[in-house]
């Protein structure tokens, strides 16, 4: 057995055991036939293909055939939410503190966040123009720019948006990577239209006197919980409407979106954990503990739901 074959067999663990026994040799043989003679490691594209196929097969075994459409629905809603928030934050970034106030700025902008928000708006443009692979690549670039703000701020000493702004954007971006390839042009334009609308709204609602530390002011902090309510309400309403037609993808979309929604609602959730009034900013420890709790509990609900669905499917079959 060659090293390449052994490594393909390791990747094949992504498939259920019964499927590996019946078709594992055929799958590995196909990849080996297509590989270059001197290759020792599976290519990244092959690795992703094997892992994706294994995940689909495991989902198919549970009987949750509507999970993948649910992922695509959640991705569409997450992309709209992420680009809408980027439109608001872009307006805020264009209003740095006037000279002489002694507030740190990143050149003519409030912080380094201008780079990430520009990336998200460009992702909305790409999504509207070119569906599929290029759209996902643009979302991935915007997501990487958002993550990179933390080390970039530490290295340069320049200000960045607070973590309670970046974390929900990262959560929404991860979900948005599952966007569908087959959306019609009218639906693909929705994230761009949403970003434009929220940008105009931000220009109206955020007064020019809001600057520098404005991510933390009372005029801006409520934006995130409001976005959480909006995303959850839209997902639940869509899920209920689809469920009336015996289509459960809306339920999966709600489950997938619970983590970014929880991160959007970090302030009120941390306030409840810290037992402080809604008008008081929760402590840093409460915010950190709530973020960790949301990041652990939210993703754990999906495999739990899949296990319950699998048990129900087996019971019905029996």
Image (spheres, grey):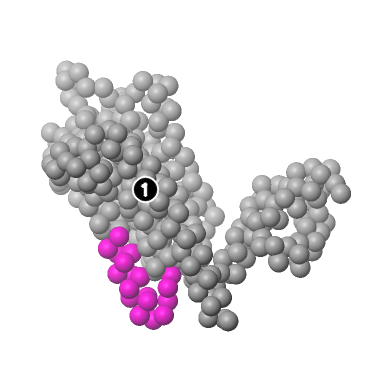
Residue 247 spot, x, y in % from top left: 42, 76
> Residue 292, located in which quarter of the rendered image?
top left
- The residue depicted at 40 percent of the width and 21 percent of the height is 156
Question: Picture quarter containing residue 249?
Answer: bottom left
Residue at (37%, 76%) from the top-left corner?
243
309 shown above or below 101: below
Q: Does the image show residue 137?
A: yes
Q: Is residue 63 left or right of residue 128?
A: right
Relative horizontal placement of residue 31, taking residue 62 as reference (left or right): right
Residue 119 forms part of the magenta stretch: no
Observer-nearest of 21 and 147: 21
Q: Nearer the viewer, residue 8 or 106?
A: 8
Q: Verify whether residue 240 appears in magenta.
A: yes
The local secondary structure at tag 1 comes to: helix
Residue found at x 43% / y 58%:
301
- Picture coordinates of residue 284 (x, y %)? 27, 33
According to the picture, the residue beneath numbered tag 1 turns out to be 294
Q: Bin the neighbour count of mark 1 within 10 Å (Cα to Cα): few under 14, some 14-19, many 20 and up.
A: many
x, y percentage for residue 193?
Answer: 31, 57
Q: Which residues are magenta?
A: 232-249
Q: On the picture, is 310 further left or further right than 189?
A: right
Locate residue 270, reporting x and y percent.
26, 43
In this rendering, would 195 be left or right of 222? right
Q: Look at the image and tell me whether residue 125 can be seen.
A: no
Count the marks. Answer: 1
Residue drawn at x 33%, y 30% as measured from the top left:
160
């Amino acid at each position: 057995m060659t090293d390449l074959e052994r490594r393909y067999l390791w990747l094949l663990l992504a498939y259920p055991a019964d499927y590996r026994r019946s078709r594992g040799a055929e799958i590995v043989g196909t990849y080996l036939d297509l590989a270059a003679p001197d290759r020792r490691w599976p290519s990244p594209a092959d690795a992703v293909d094997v892992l994706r196929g294994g995940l689909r097969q495991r989902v198919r075994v549970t009987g949750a055939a509507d999970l993948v459409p649910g992922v695509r629905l959640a991705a569409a809603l997450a992309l709209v939410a992420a680009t809408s928030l980027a439109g608001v934050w872009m307006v805020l970034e264009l209003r740095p503190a006037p000279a002489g106030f002694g507030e740190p700025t990143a050149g003519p902008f409030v912080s380094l966040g201008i780079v990430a928000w520009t990336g998200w708006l460009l992702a909305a443009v790409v999504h509207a123009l070119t569906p599929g692979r290029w759209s996902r690549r643009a979302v991935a670039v915007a997501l990487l720019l958002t993550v990179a703000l933390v080390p970039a701020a530490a290295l340069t000493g320049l200000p960045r948006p607070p973590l309670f702004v970046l974390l929900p954007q990262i959560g929404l971006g991860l979900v948005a990577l599952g966007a569908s390839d087959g959306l019609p042009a009218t639906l693909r334009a929705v994230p761009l239209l949403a970003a434009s609308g929220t940008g105009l709204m931000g220009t109206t609602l955020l007064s020019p006197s809001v600057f520098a530390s404005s991510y933390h002011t009372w005029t801006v902090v409520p934006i995130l919980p409001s976005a959480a309510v909006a995303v959850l309400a839209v997902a639940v309403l869509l899920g209920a409407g689809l469920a009336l037609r015996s289509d459960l993808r809306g339920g999966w979309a709600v489950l997938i979106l619970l983590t970014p929604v929880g991160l959007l609602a970090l302030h009120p959730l941390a306030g409840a954990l810290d037992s402080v009034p809604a008008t008081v900013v929760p402590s840093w420890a409460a915010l950190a503990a709530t973020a960790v709790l949301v990041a652990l509990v939210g993703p754990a609900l999906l495999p739990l739901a899949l296990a319950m669905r699998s048990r129900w499917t087996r019971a019905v079959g029996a």
